[in-house]
Every structure is written in C-alpha cells, then in structure tokens.
Image: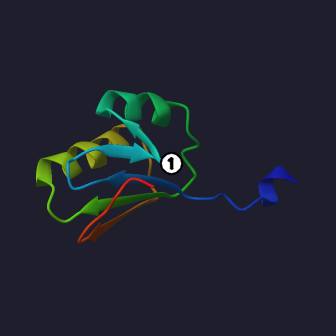
Amino acid sequence: SVQNEVRQSQTIIIDEKGIIYFNSNPLSLNGLRECLAQADRGVPIQVRADKNITVQACVDVLDLLAAERFQRVSLQTERSVKGE
C-alpha cells in the first residue's frame, strides 16, 4: 500500500556561490518556494550547505522550509558542496 512506502528524503544544496539546488535542479529562492509548495510535508528534507556561504543564504532557505511547515529538516555543512 502507499502508506507502507518509505518516504525518500529530498535534498536542498547551497553551493559555495550561494546557488540553491533542489533535487539537483538549480533554482532561485522563489523557484524553491514554488517547488516546496507542491511537496509532501512528511518527506524529510536535507539541507546541505557549503561552509563558506553567508549565514543569511542558509537562514533564507531554513525560513522558507519553516514557512512551508516542513518539520523533518536536517542541516549539514560541508567544506565544498556542489550541485549534484
């Protein structure tokens, strides 16, 4: 049944230039908002951010996730993150 399917996590990447990728697709913050508006709120979201980006770039994405009522969010910072 659909209820028994494992919900796969979605990934948001913020690379060293501050470019946002959602499931490997580069997006603006508004583009990300549009994609998230249609996403399942029960799916875990992993935010992977390059350690050299501004704090504000990361906060903007986290604020958007909170505004869209995602509750299963994890944040991971890395030395060098590239859109996949």
Image x and y of residue 81, in percent: 31, 62
Image x and y of residue 14, in percent: 30, 52
Nearest to the observer: residue 29 or residue 19? 19
| Rendered residue at 18%/47% (across/down) | 57
- Is 52 drawn above or below residue 69 in the view shown? below
Circle count:
1
Q: Quadrant of residue 53?
A: bottom left
Which residue is at the far bottom?
79
Image x and y of residue 20, in percent: 32, 44
- Is 39 drawn above or below residue 78 in the view shown? above
Mark 1: secondary structure: loop
> On the picture, is 82 further left or further right than 53?
right
| Rendered residue at 11%/53% (across/down) | 54
Which residue is at the far right?
1
* Scheme of image coloration: rainbow
Image quadrant occupied by the C terminus: bottom left
> On the picture, is 62 further left or further right than 9?
left
Nearest to the observer: residue 12 or residue 6? 12
> On the picture, is 45 further left or further right than 18?
right
Q: What amino acid is labelled 1 in the image?
A: Asn
Image quadrant occupied by the N terminus: bottom right
Task: List the residue tagged with mark 1.
Answer: 23
Characterize the local packing of mark 1: few (<14), some (14-19) or many (20 or more) Cα atoms within 10 angstroms: few
| Rendered residue at 20%/49% (across/down) | 17
Image x and y of residue 24, in percent: 47, 48
Q: Quadrant of residue 40?
A: top right
